[in-house]
Image: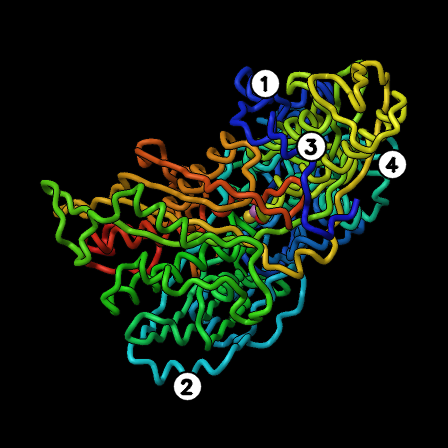
Amino acid sequence: MKFDTPAGTNPIDRLTVVGKPTDRIDGPKKTTGTAPYAYERHDVAANPAYGYVLGAGIAKGRIASMDLAAARAAPGVLAIVTHENAGKLGKGDMNTARLLGGPAIDHYHQAIAIVVADTFEQARHAAGLIRVDYARAKGRFDLDEQLRAAPLKGDSSGEGSAAPPIERVGDFDRAFAAAPVTLDQRYTTPDHSHAMMEPHATIAAWEGDKLTVWTSNQMIAWAVGDLAKTLLIPKENIRVDSPFVGGGFGGKLFLRADVVMAALAAREAKRAVKVALQRPLIANNTTHRPATAQRIRLGCAKDGTITAIAHESGSGDLPGGGPETATSQTKLLYAGANRLTAMRLAVLDLPEGNAMRAPGEAPGMMALEMAIDEMAEKLGMDPVAFRVKNDTQVDPAKPERRFSQRRLVECLERGAREFGWDRRSATPARVRDGQWLVGLGVAAAFRNNINMKSAARVRVSGGRVTVETDMTDIGTGSYTIIAQTAAEMLGVPLSAVDVRLGDSTFPVSSGSGGQWGANSATAGVYAACAKLREAVAAKLGFNSADVTFADGQVSAGGRQVPLAQAGDLSAEDAMEYGDLAKKEQQSTFGAHFVEARVHALTGEIRVERMLAVCAAGRILNPKSARSQVIGAMTMGVGAALMEELAVDKRFGFFVNHDLASYEVPVHADIPYQQVIFLDEVDPTTSPMKAKGVGELGICGVGAAVANAIYNATGVRVRDYPITLEKHL
Ligand code: MOS
């Protein structure tokens, strides 16, 4: 089914199941420990051997020699795979560095060996006996130093596309020079780690030349494709299965070393092998969100009209890698006739950077929305009013291109009312509660909406419905919204729908990433259900086009037949997207409000209250969408106050590579969160009329926290995370 005209009325609009706050249908499995996560697939691989991955001890250079003798002789050891016996390997499209290193080493903790043994303890012990001699080379580990040598480029914003030149609208330099009120500031965000609960984990088993991996991955078809390219075997010989994912946050968008090393180990050991990357390996072996250094310049008229806006962002990556696209939102969020966005990409020999929790906008908004707050203060304007004044309903670079929906102003104004914004003191450091300084902060939220082709297969049998698609549920609630969609389309209760996900033998879905999963994957299920409805109607002898499916009955023209009488029927289809999204700009909007307290004597920072108001199309399940947003808000607090991978610039690695020293918020850090969804449908996105909302929930939060802290203390900290020593 091709989607290229705005959706009219369809069965989803009845909203008998869709749009209702619904408990996760997979909840009981998760709470009873029966949801099969990759490392615990006792059902698929009886008596697997255990693999333990050894990471490189240098950041750049070569392995001069490896002595495996002691490890081979250790108790229980079945096999060891290194670059010396792995055979010829290729490389996937999505990873920058090879997933098995050696003899050349591209980054610290790049996998260089896997030891397979009868038990995990034996494998770990033997891995510790491997002697590696390295020839260390000089690496580039200092972002600021490397950025000075890096050229300024445009924002490629689109995976794999070559960076266009610096993007300009009007004449920024002239407008900035002429503006009566200006701001020119530098903001930095550090390297971040996904820190998901479930580590990257895989069980691999071969049957002849056919490989099955039970793993934890967000994008099944990408994993199959890149595994084929890495192992140099046909895609058809690979099955990837990932029905449950214990958090991904972008760290599991791509094939990673656990999969490749498990597959190589299983081939060598001639036995199923299970591998979980040990926690201390993950920060340096897998991907991370790259640090940014951003410069923002704003020029305003005295009445608060933005006349000039420039955003430059610098980040680094391994040779061949890409930039953190932190300037993307600045092209679309505010009006302004004269604009400039550009990026610098430095070459670094640190572990590879890639997508994490709303890449681009999340760190970009941390800078932009702090700059907007600073400019409002310079103008003597309320920061909500300043944002409202500079709203735009069109793409500022292409005025003929409108936003399909854009209710940023409503989000800001509704949030201000609900949050008690009128109690904010415009002058900072004026509100005290005992020894605590109290402040309120606001930021806009912005994230683009992307639609991806997504397919599904739907079957009815005796009135029960089964949906199969390789869509993933990364803790987001995909199982539930897919079941809601099928139930609505086929007129059956939610309890009559079974959803099977994450298996590459199922039709290829959008997968989970870039907040595209909810709208795209349910639209694919819609397409398959629409096809199935036709088959059911034909089988039951209806010739009318407007057959109703409701309450387990199929009816038209006064005749009613139970769906169960259709017997066994199935249909497969995909939702594909035409040019509609190109005609109108599809984005999601919101506003974040934060109350923060800072202890006047110790500098301790506490977030007291948070509110997010979101306008993101139809909300398919307000309950799981709210969970998405409060989780994202929590991650925003992490980015504002805690999260930072500390770079060792001498040896080139992230020092704090565990959950004890890479700090993330805990429940006690997050006392009160409220989420409001504006009642919205966007008929341009799909027949579901929905958009992504999960990543919207994080974009802007960090700046709202920073702005609240500034309002409390009067001290502006522009280098995240805002730890207490920075404002004392
Ligand atoms: Mo997301 S960072 O695209 O999984």
The three-letter code of the residue at mark 1 reads Lys
475 relative to 411, above or below: above
Nearer the camera: disc 1 or disc 2: 2
Residue 209 is tagged as: 4
Side (left or right) of 713 relative to 143 = left
Q: Which residue has dot 1 on it?
A: 29
Dot 1 or dot 2: first in sequence order is 1
Dot 2 or dot 4: first in sequence order is 2
Between 465 and 357, the one nearer to me in the picture: 465
Please tell me whether mark 3 sits on a helix, a strand or a loop.
helix
The three-letter code of the residue at mark 2 reads Arg
Q: Residue at x 74, y 27 (%)?
A: 467
Q: Is mark 4 within 8 Å of ligand 1?
A: no
How packed mark 4 is, by other alpha carbons closer than 10 Å (few <14, some 14-19, many 20 or more), is few
Side (left or right) of 723 relative to 638 = left
Dot 1 or dot 3: first in sequence order is 3
Side (left or right) of 666 relative to 201 = left
Query: x, y (%) of residue 263?
Result: 74, 37
Question: From where the camera sits, is residue 424 visible?
Answer: yes
Q: Separation of disc 1 and disc 2 at Cα?
A: 61 Å
Side (left or right) of 177 relative to 209 = left
The three-letter code of the residue at mark 4 reads Asp
Between 727 and 685, the one nearer to me in the picture: 685
Nearer the camera: disc 1 or disc 4: 1
How packed mark 3 is, by other alpha carbons closer than 10 Å (few <14, some 14-19, many 20 or more), is some
Nearer the camera: disc 3 or disc 4: 3
Please tell me whether mark 2 sits on a helix, a strand or a loop.
helix
